[in-house]
Image: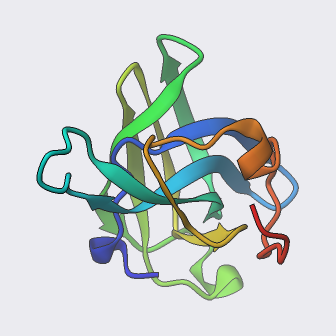
Amino acid sequence: MDFEQMGWHDCRVYGIKLDRENFEIAFDLDYIFKWVEPSPGETYYKFWISPATLVFENVYDIKLELGEPDFEIDFIERTEPRRPRNAEYIKKDTEWIWSLEAHRGALSFRSVGYQQFIRKLPVLSKHPILDTDMRGGISFDRCLKNDPF
């Protein structure tokens, strides 16, 4: 995925899953594809949004600091690129420090990269989050469901 083209501002995180066996950290979130500016006479933005699973690979050195249980991402950045210690084994040339800054907390870790899986087709919403029924509850699935909202 093209990190420079992606953006996670105001994406709500519903769950975080640590998979120690596979060295992964996964996030269940509502991914905002596009903010739609208000039409004339309207006041609020609308959002093209979909439930998604964001998975970082070959993760270690995790640091978590949450102020409250609600976790909305402000931004994600990557810094300090270097060659992974196990580069030959994982077949990746670069790892970074990934920082997920939230409105009320932060999370950082080392990882070689990520994959994001869209679980349902995006819908146009008046809100930047989906309700539980629309998103299908908390999930770390990695496939698109064919059922409509």
Q: Kindly identify the residue that appears in the image at 40 percent across and 19 percent down.
A: 104
Look at 55% across and 84% down and name the residue there: 92
Residue 16: x and y, percent? 69, 39
Direction from residue 79 to residue 92 in the image, left or right: right
Q: Quadrant of residue 53?
A: bottom right
In the rendered view, would you say 123 is above or below 73? Answer: below
- Residue drawn where x is 43% and y is 76% of the image: 94
Q: Is residue 1 left or right of residue 121?
A: left
In this view of the protein, which residue sits in the foreground, 28 or 137? 137
In the rendered image, residue 73, in percent from the top left (x then y), is placed at 41, 39
> With 56 as the anchor, is 6 left or right in this view?
left
Q: Position of residue 26 (x, y in %)?
A: 69, 52
Could you say which is closer to the camera, residue 45 or residue 9? 45
Looking at the figure, which quarter contains the C terminus? bottom right
The residue positioned 45% from the left and 33% from the top of the image is 72
Q: Pick the residue in front: 3 or 85.
A: 3
Q: How are the colours assigned in the image?
A: rainbow
